[in-house]
Image (cartoon, helix red, strand yellow):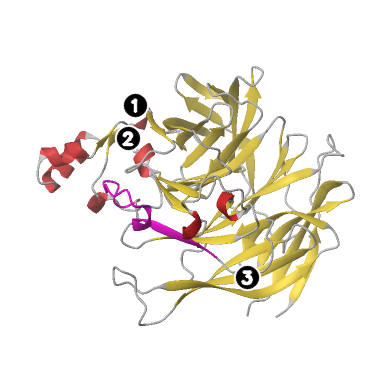
Amino acid sequence: MRLHASKLDLPLPTSSPAAAVSYLLYEHSSRSLALVLDDFSALLYPSLSPTRLPAPNHTAVPPPSTAACFVRLLPSSRVLFLTAAPLAAGSSIQLRVWILLSRRGSAAAAFSPARLDFRNDRGRFSVALGLRHGHSVRLAGSVNVFVIHSVAANQIWVFAAKMAAGEEATVHLMKCAVVELSLPIYSITISMGFMLLGEVDGVRVFPLRSLIKGKLSKSRVSTIKKATASTGDLCKKNLPNGLMIPKNFIKSSLVPEVEENTDKLKTVRVTQDSSDPYSFFVFIKPAELQSCKGSKSTLSSLKAVRIHVLSEKKYLILDSAGGLHFLNFNESGGMALDLNAQSSMPFKYAHAYQLNNVMEVHFLAVLPDISSEIQYAWLSDGEYSIHLISIVDAEIADDETDKDGSKQKSTVLSAVGAIFTSEKIQDLVPISSNLCLVLCQVGSHAVISCWVSFFNLS
């Protein structure tokens, strides 16, 4: 195995020569990189290629941007960069969007401010959301969907986005759901048709389809009626924000659909501890400690601080004690496909168990790969070392089966390689299974010192 690291110099705007990088964001489909600076501005680099330096021209996102995320729109394949900022002394949130567009007369692409259509606001470069900003907010995005978490308001707003008809740089936003929170949230991940919330002792899973699905057109309702036993069966699938499609009509659970008439949606309101068909909870602590409430031990108060997607039904969780947990959605119980299940037993849908890792993990970066049987993760102790591990499912034994007759499996972690840096590590972003961007700290503050680490896995 060959190990190599090289420095990636990215230009800073001349207006902010002393700005330092707080964290990195990367959008894999367009290879776009965002550097979020400590002066609440950001730099956007499209089509970043570490093998072709210097880096392409950047787009500067002016401050303030207290939270940011990427969103990919399908079927248009457009890539959006969203930012949130306080408005009116933090009593509301200002949302801005940049869209990746090809330049006229050039094959190169660049980010440009996008106009937004939201409710009565049409064609504006920013919209005001009636959600308290407070001290901080979180943004998390995926395909066609993004969410805003307001700690001050104890709410999560779920939005769907799509390109406005006939306009290249206008994005239509639809507020689909509000989740009322009663417990602290330590992380949010949107992917593969699910919203996962990191809580104390575990992860809460919300299937996105039940939160964003809108009313069906008359032709689709007629088709569904013909396929169901009776009109009563169809009424049983009714939810506050529209009718659910039977699973035989769901083409894919990975990409939430955005109907053409979704701007007429009634925003559904659910509570954080809502049960089927809205959510279920998966414990990450050992089973013997799940009933021990009020204990001061570390194991009984683990927080899920990072949730990363491995593949369609597999997730890797980092807890507040530096431990890793593997979350697996059961083949027969995927809530994304059957939202009308009435069982209250979370293990019917998913289960989680702790992995045997010998180091205390501070930073975790994972590149999801649905097609591969082997996934890779980048780990760091928060000091000067980075480790690449492989993650493989292995059957324990042929004679050991679960109660439902399925074979038990374990997750095997294997060390692939390691690299040591001269600067303290501050953030990790995976580019591919053998490529990772590393943000390092130089002196008393972080600067743009991104290291590209190459591992030859052949």
Residue type, numbered disc 3: Ile
Viewer-side residue, 390 vs 168: 390
Q: Is residue 77 above or below residue 329?
A: above
| Residue 451 circle label | none
Residue type, numbered disc 2: Gly
- Residue ID for mark 2: 214
Viewer-side residue, 242 vs 305: 305
- Please identify the quadrant where the N terminus is shown: bottom right
Residue 129 in picture, x, y percent from top left: 53, 23
Residue 437 in picture, x, y percent from top left: 71, 58
Q: Which secondary structure lies at badge 2?
A: loop
Q: Compute the Cα span from label 3 to label 2.
A: 41 Å
The answer to whether the residues at label 3 and label 1 have Cβ atoms under 8 Å apart is: no
- Residue ID for mark 3: 389
Q: Is residue 331 above or below residue 37?
A: below
Region rendered in magenta: 336-354
Q: Which secondary structure lies at badge 3?
A: strand
Q: Is residue 98 above or below residue 371?
A: above
**Disc on the earlier residue, 3 or 1:** 1
Residue type, numbered disc 1: Lys
